[in-house]
Amino acid sequence: MLKAIVSTALFLCVASVAHAQTVTDPNEIASRLRFWATDAGDPVYYGEVKNVNRRGMRPAGHYQCLALAFIKYENGAFSYAHKMWSKSRDGSCHYDDVTSRKVGNHGTCVRDTNAGFGNAVGTALMTKANIDYQHSTFRTIDTKTRRVGETAACVPPRGASAGLYSLKIEDGRLKVMTTRPLDYEVNINPQDPLHPPTQPVF
């Protein structure tokens, strides 16, 4: 009996340490993600964007709700599509109802079925059926040039991006902080966009 208790305690301790482990190597981070270019489904990561206190570069509270889809990983660069929107008055991000709320930041060169022009916003769910991932130019997190955002291929001559301050997996979340500064955080467990999370902030 004592042996079983000790084994269980050891397992829980190891699991806790694994959960708390911080991963910063881009290749290791990529190995833990699912990409539309190689995945039969269309996994989406949900979370939020936070403001950042410039003094100390620490997250300083909620900014926008976030849905993020990784497209591919090549030569140290993560290609991604994302949508951001404001919380409702009830304090929820309503990941399950982005079609009735205005959703922006779909990307200038992303072919989104419900994306408008100029200041118009897209409201489509983050799915392969709504976003033409094979013929779009996506934003990138380039760990070699340390830039995040629109690429030169989309917005010539140099793109429209911010610097990459940090990239890591920590406490069950993928965290990307830019020098803008903003902190993008998503749960490391992706979900089917047709069945997104229902928690206020995932």
Image: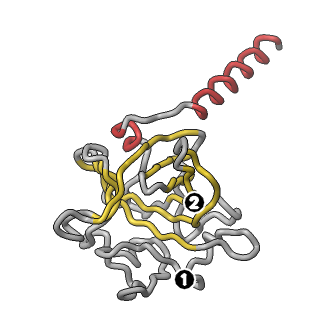
The quadrant in which residue 105 appears is bottom left
For the point 35% across and 51% down, which residue is it?
A: 163
| 161 to 1, vertically: above or below | below
Q: Identify which amino acid the numbered label 1 is placed on.
A: Lys
Image location (x, y in percent) of residue 112: 37, 79
Residue at point 61% right, 69% down?
A: 95
Which label number is shown at residue 48?
A: 2
In the image, which disc is placed on residue 102?
A: 1
- The answer to which of 36 and 173 lies nearer the viewer is 173
Q: Position of residue 111 (x, y in %)?
A: 32, 78
Q: Nearer the viewer, residue 96 or 181?
A: 181
Image quarter hosting the C terminus:
bottom right
**Horizontal side of residue 130 vs 103, given as left or right:** left
From the top left corner, tell me how far across and down residue 178 is, in percent: 43, 52
Most distant residue in the right direction: 1
Which sits earlier in the primary sequence, circle 1 or circle 2? Answer: 2
**Whole-percent x, y for residue 138 in the image:** 30, 66
Mark 1 is surrounded, within 10 Å at the Cα level, by few (under 14), some (14 to 19) or many (20 or more) other residues, namely some
**Image check: 141 left or right of 13?**
left
Label of residue 180 in the image: none
> Judging from the image, what secondary structure is the residue with disc 2 in?
strand
